[in-house]
Image: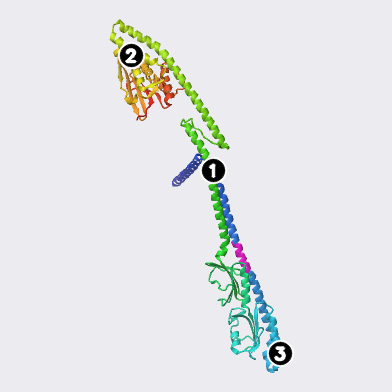
Amino acid sequence: MEGADFWLLFLLLMREREERRRETLRFIRGRWRESSIVVKLMIAFVLVILPLYGISIMITQVSSNQMQTEVEKAHESKLYFYHNHLQFELERMSALVTEFSFDETMSTLSTRAAIMSRYEVTSSLNNIHNKLAQIMVTSPYISDVVYYVPALHKRVSAADGIRDVEDNEWQNLLASMGNLNGELSHSNNDLYFLKSNPYNMNHEEPPNFILGIRLSAEELKHRLQQLSETGESEITLSFGEQQHVVISSSEQPAPVKPIRTVSPEPSESMQVTKFQSDPYLYYSLHDKDHSFTLTATIPQDVLRAPLEQYNVWLWMVTFMSVVIIIVFSFSIYRSIHQPLAVLIRGFRMAEQGQTSVHIPSSRRDEFGYLYSRFNHMIERLHILIDENYVARIRTSEAELKHLQSQIQPHFLYNSLFSIKQMAEVENVELIQEFTDYLGQYFKYMSRDSHTEVSLGAEIDHALVYASIQKIRFGSRIQLELEDLDVRYKMISIPRVIIQPIVENVFEHALAKRSQGGILQLSYHQDQDNLSIRIEDDGDQLTDETLNYLQSAFEEIERKHGNEEITGLLNVNQRLRIKFGAAYGLTAQRSELGGLCIIVKIPWKGE
């Protein structure tokens, strides 16, 4: 059971994780769809530039590493070349020493001198001098070839000739034999290939002879300088395990104190070992047979030079990429974003009802065409609105005149009938009051030259009509009329707006009441709007009728066949034409129980 619970929990967690991933993807897609086209273009351009920039960086790094590798290989090749050359020369000199150490004249002179005349000894020494001279010219690395005969206290030199020597000279030379752990020996700052016959560990006992080839330190240094000129490096040749003799291509050689890396595995061919010690990099090649080491000392700046050069190019590419992005962004802003923003601003102004908007442009591209079409559309829209507005005004005026033509005969008939009844009972004062109201009413209704009047005049006209009806219906009707604030009296509204609503109250709510009929008129100001409430206590209003009336007010373009609400619809349409769709009539149930018509008009106080 515990295992099943674990798997159920695991599946729930995986499902929750998948849901979060999907929500994240939906969020990203939604933000992408909502983004501006300019932002999308910029992101697309950056996505194109970034791979190219990444490839440039990769090529730069690969090329730099390859260049550095080639530089390292070049230095290694130089070391191998000079090592092979020097190894060949040293082996040849070693072979010459060995070969001439078995020369009969050199090897037997010490033993034959006792039985030889002075002339013969001198002749043999001259002969040996000639042979030493022949050895000297065989290699540029030989500075001198010496031959010591301790028994005769003689020294023969290819460079200095024949002379007498003290014992300490050959003893010192003999004592240095093999002191560099190889065939080479070091004595008095000079390098020698030495052979003695016979070989004796007791350096105080004189051998038959000592033959030595002295190496030329100047020639070795000259060759090192030639080798270092092409690589901007310093070549050092050291002899002995402890670097007893050091010859460098530089007058002031760099200190060779690197920390050795792990030595490579022994192999038949020698390998270059790398050393590193700031600020130098060392390449070392060691020859165990002749106990010498070649070391190339290279400043790391030299090796970094290719990388730095490529880094310069990389920064240049980066700078150019940034410049291109900036130029592209500015170009996109100028050529797309700016004109697009102007077009969007024009559409937003048109949405707000500003039909006089015009986009001036001399562009000849696609935006120029859009601008011209937009201006043409706005002009056409302005013309259509004007035509529609004029048509509605004319229709409204025609409906008003038609309404007046319908109302006046009917109302005139009822009024004359009421005067007849008052005359029959000889109520002269009431007839006088009634006819005064009736005169004011017809004077207001017959004034066709003005389509708009002040709210105060319109309310007065509606009150005149209500007073006429009050006289007609007597005590059956009760009027609750709130005084109009002086601030609202000068509001300009279409003529004959309030009276048709009051007339509707009398005809459909109060005419059939035998008693208790109430007509209430009140005002309510909310911010910049004024609401005129006309209510009654009629008991014939159903919810179906109320809903139908309110829907008729909201859908003014719809044709309604109900003649009872035609007058109200006419008022509502005229108010909307005058003030806009936010204004007009609203129907709701009154707190008195009957219908409440709210006339909403704009008002801006001081």
Name the amino acid, label 1: Ile
2 and 1 marks in contact (CB < 8 Å): no
Say which residue label 1 marks: 332
* Residue 169 vertical position relative to residue 298 in the rendered view, above or below: below
Using the image as rendered, state which of residue 25 and residue 482 is in the foreground: 482
Return the x and y of residue 560 as percentages of the image width and height: 45, 19
Q: Position of residue 135 (x, y in %)?
A: 69, 81
- Which residue in the structure is indicated by mark 2? 437
Say which element carries label 1: helix
Secondary structure at badge 2 equals: helix
Classed neighbour count for the residue bearing mark 3: other residues with Cα under 10 Å, few (<14), some (14–19), many (≥20)? few
* Secondary-structure class at tag 3: helix
- Which of labels 2 and 1 is toward the front? 2
- Residue 321 shows up from this direction: yes
Give the main secondary structure, helix, strand or loop, of the magenta stretch: helix
Residue 401 x, y percent position in the rendering:
43, 15
* Amino acid type of the residue that numbered disc 3 sits on in the rendered structure: Ser
Task: Count the labels in the image.
Answer: 3
Q: Identify the amino acid type marked 2.
A: Tyr
Q: CA distance from mark 3 to mark 2?
A: 174 Å
Q: Nearer the viewer, mark 3 or mark 1?
A: 1
Image quadrant where one finds the C terminus: top left
Q: Earlier in the sequence, mark 3 or mark 2?
A: 3
Residue marked by disc 3 = 123
Split into 4 quadrants, where in the image is the N terminus? top left
Residue 195 image-quadrant placement: bottom right
What segment carries the magenta color?
A: 68-79
Q: Nearer the viewer, residue 546 or 78?
A: 78
Q: Is residue 79 visible?
A: no
